[in-house]
Image (cartoon, rainbow, N blue to C red):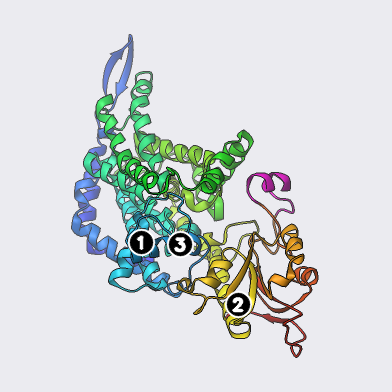
Amino acid sequence: MANAWLSVHLIWINGDAVEARNSLYACHAVILSPVSVNGQRKAMVSAADNLRVAGPSVSARACLFAYALIFSALFLTHLPLLRLPYFWDEAGYFIPAARDLLLSGSLIPHTTLSNAHPPLVMLWLAFWWKFSAFTPAVTRTAMLLVAAFALLGLWRLARDVANPAVALATVLCTALYPVFFAQSTMAHLDMMAAAFTLWGLAMYIEGRRVAMIVFFALAPLAKETAIVAPLALLAWEWICPLLDHTSAGPEARCLHQRGWLRSSSLLLCLLPLAAWFIYHHHRTGFFFGNPQYLRYNLEATLNPLRIALALLLRLWHVLGYLDLFLLTLAAAAVMGRPPLRQPDGSLRPRIAIAVQLVFAVVILAYLLALSFAGGAVLARYMLPVVPLVVLVCISTLQRRARRWAWWIAFTCAVFVMQLVVPPPYRIAPEDTLLYRDYVIGHKLAANELAARYPQARVLTAWPASDELTRPFLGYVKQPLAVARLENFSPLEMAQAAQASDQFDVVLLFTTKWQPLHPLFRVLPFGRALQQRFFDYHEDLPPLAAADLLGGRVVRYWNRNNEWIAIIAIEKIENAAARGPAFCRYP
């Protein structure tokens, strides 16, 4: 659907595309002028000449049509997901924080602990709730607007550095990549951070300094880690001229030749984020969130071994995760082939080396920064840079492989399949439509508890504890009484068994999804390191938990090994229902 609609768009603005293509090829024509450097002959080419920028030809009208088509395609493909209740971190922090902003006007949440995340996403959601309705459908549609804006920025960036065909293929692959697709409707911070980062990079490539600073200043107001991109570019602008003077190649490494003072204007991107942290400290007494949050996301991560392991996981996330290796390995495989020729006999152009180095610097900065910081090593944290990997790979394939379009079509088909068929290795459910299985199961369980045990005390873990006590999350109409435990590990469940008089029903669910038929029988890095650095534990199975707690499994749902169970303790159990009911998702 997205492919067809974007193709219609390209036909509609065919005049713009032709003009852009002519501009690209005209800018690509360069004249090498030999100069003497330290007694050696050196062919120098300015990065501006090498860069094939289509900036002015991408008109406001073209961007408007592209945005409308992209959003329409996203809306239609995500339509079945728009009414789903909130999932995990949405329910645990972002929706309550945005709701507090809506009701009280306070940027600091009071119904949940503040973790110092900047408020831009919460402001965006509160705006739409105020002028529309406070429902999951409005929330998810508002996030689709952000995802469409991110894809529009990627489309512009790809046209700037490559051509319309590569831009179209890049947008399509990124939109269907499971992590991007799943995150497109979710109320997380990463999609907005990715959108502003991609637009900031597009403006940086085009040399639009003021617009670049605006976008790069907004990105960390969506998520603080987005400050990595402008700081990486600043460091590169300071270092690159030193490397360029020692380069013997014919093509310049520096995209923009600026002095130290002008490059330092990128530091302006820090000001809004710094102002937020100062304000947060004024209101809460903490610069970077409550002590537990800071300890989990920074202090506990600064271990050399943990940093090395996290870096390996981050590399997997940007190079191979959820079939992304279909693009990266294919691009590596064709690098040994000579570039193909166009009808006029010239070689198919590549992305300028200076631009590729800019992409590499930003990607490397994200890899390193998020290996040092961040307690949870989640794939969505890399959303600002994964589209850059996709763009470079597709440009390489288009330049060197004759049937590159067929490979892109095959890759997109595999991405779609991966959305609904879980891989044979551990992933976060929010990276595919596994999160839908989780949400539907929890909604069914909440309905069951509300109908059969409305006065019971329910023992469960977060985030189900919030789902059952906060009706605005979409699971229950009236809050239930909840006793909370940390997780469903054997140790936690054994401790709960010692206080069985404090609860009547247990809501048990998988907190660490495991594939039904794992590709590897052992955990990456081993069980001990996973438990030490990445909060790994195994959930006690429902039957074993029922035996330990002295109850019976009365309901059990399972889809794609995303399971949830209700255990009734014997003292309130309905004696007429003697066996567990094993249910399938609708």
Could you give the CA–CA distance between mark 3 and mark 2, rounded to whole angstroms?
A: 24 Å
> Of marks 1 and 2, which one's residue comes earlier in the chain?
1
Quadrant of the image occupied by residue 147: bottom left
Could you give the CA–CA distance between mark 1 and mark 2, rounded to whole angstroms?
A: 30 Å
Q: What numbered label is drawn on residue 213?
A: none
- In the rendered image, residue 294, in percent from the top left (x then y), is placed at 51, 44
Amino acid, disc 3:
Thr
**Res 52 visible:** no
**Quarter that holds the N terminus:** bottom left
Quadrant of the image occupied by residue 134: bottom left
Left or right: 325 in relation to 53: right
Q: What residue sits right under mark 3 in the picture?
A: 111
- In the rendered image, residue 421, in percent from the top left (x then y), is placed at 59, 66
Q: What residue sits right under mark 1 in the picture?
A: 101
**Quarter that holds the C terminus:** bottom right
- In the rendered image, residue 417, in percent from the top left (x then y), is placed at 54, 65
Magenta residues? 520-535
Left or right: 444 in relation to 173: right
**Res 440 visible:** yes
Could you give the CA–CA distance between mark 1 and mark 3, rounded to whole angstroms?
A: 11 Å
Q: What secondary structure is marked by label 2?
A: helix
Q: Residue at x 31, y 33 (%)?
A: 255
Q: Is residue 533 magenta?
A: yes
Residue closer to the observer: 18 or 289 = 289
Q: Is residue 246 above or below residue 385?
A: above
Q: Residue at x 45, y 46 (%)?
A: 389
Q: What residue sits right under mark 2 in the picture?
A: 445
Residue closer to the observer: 577 or 344 = 577
Q: Are marks 1 and 2 in contact (CB under 8 Å)?
A: no
